[in-house]
Image: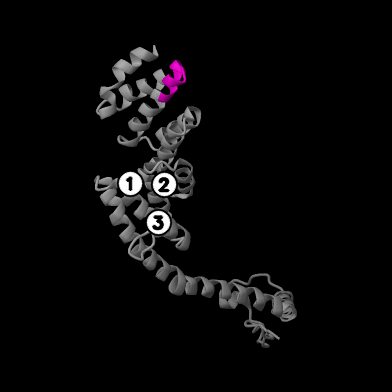
Amino acid sequence: MATYNKRGFKAPKEKEEKDPAQEGGYIEDVNVDDKDSTTAGVFNTLDETANKTEAWVEKNQKAIFGVVGAIAVVAIGWLCYQKFVADPKQEDGAEALYVAQQNFQKAVDGVKPDSLFVLALKGSEGQYGFVDIADKFSGTDAGNLANYYAGVSYLNTGKYNEAIQHLEKFKSDDAVLSVMAIGLQGDAFSQKNQPKEALEFYVKAAEKNKNEFTAPLYLLKAGKTALALNQKADALKYFQDIKDNYDASPEAQQVDGLIGLAQ
């Protein structure tokens, strides 16, 4: 049982009565007995509170220790996952991605692009391609990036539904890649002859991050698509946005003639 030391609570010693006038002092009107009993009461209250707390802890200690233990288990589990599962998986995924990236880059450079895009998707030399990397290393940076590469590769091989599926899975905070993934879905819908859906994605891409590179690119695509849909007012708005806000971009060199068509 917790007991507080009642310091300062002592019985007053008997003193010889002195004449205050002789001592030249000042006597405060204090009832000693009342003061001491009040102090004792305070300490008794503290004792009672401490005892009740101890009793509650003793009664509920299984639940308390259970909660603390559960938190510890979760924390230890997370650290173990990061050390023994997530980190090695990240490393293995990055290594697998490297070979597929080589095939992808060669295809982009124009070296047998069709066959190399397929190799990048499906794998080569006993190595995973983007499709398997996205699946087997899901939850890692490599797996996420593989979805982007797979989407672009499928787009370049005419597999537009597959391109959209992988690009939808790609998540990034990068100002350019996050926008490109949206805009490329617009390209896939455009290739599928679904201009309304394409326009939706182009506008979304243009508005997601208004940087000097992607914004005018997708505003131009949005304007051209709106013009093809005979939505001239919208087309004019997109073209004018380029002229007013991105006049140094390559796209701005094209908009004067397009503005005339939209008016």
Q: Tell me residue 154's x, y (percent).
A: 41, 46
Q: CA distance from mark 1 to mark 2?
A: 14 Å
Q: Residues within 10 Å of mark 3 (few under 14, many from 20)?
A: some
Label at residue 161: none
What's the residue type where badge 3 is placed? Answer: Lys
Q: Tell me residue 166's x, y (percent).
A: 46, 48
Question: Which residue is tagged 2?
Answer: 151
What's the residue type where badge 1 is placed? Answer: Asp
Mark closer to the chain start, 1 or 2:
1
Nearer the observer, 207 or 4: 207
Tell me the quarter of the picture where residue 44 sits. Answer: bottom right
The answer to whether residue 57 shows anywhere in this view is: no
Q: Tell me residue 132's x, y (percent).
A: 44, 59
Please report contact status of discs 3 and 1: CB closer than 8 Å, yes or no. Answer: no
Secondary element under disc 2, as helix, strand or loop, is helix
What's the residue type where badge 2 is placed? Answer: Gly
Q: Residues within 10 Å of mark 2 (few under 14, many from 20)?
A: many
Magenta-drawn segment:
225-234
Mark 2 or mark 3, which is nearer to you? 3
Dividing the image into 4 quarters, which one contains the N terminus?
bottom right
Question: Which residue is tagged 1?
Answer: 114
Tell me the quarter of the picture where residue 94 sits. Answer: bottom left
Considering only vertical position in the picture, is 72 above or below 149?
below
Mark closer to the chain start, 2 or 3:
3
Question: Which residue is tagged 3?
Answer: 122
Mark 1 or mark 2, which is nearer to you? 1
Residue 70 colored in magenta in the image: no
Q: Residue at x 44, y 22 (%)?
A: 226
Q: Residue at x 44, y 39 (%)?
A: 185
Q: Give the prevailing secondary structure in the magenta stretch.
A: helix
Secondary element under disc 3, as helix, strand or loop, is helix
Dividing the image into 4 quarters, which one contains the C terminus?
top left
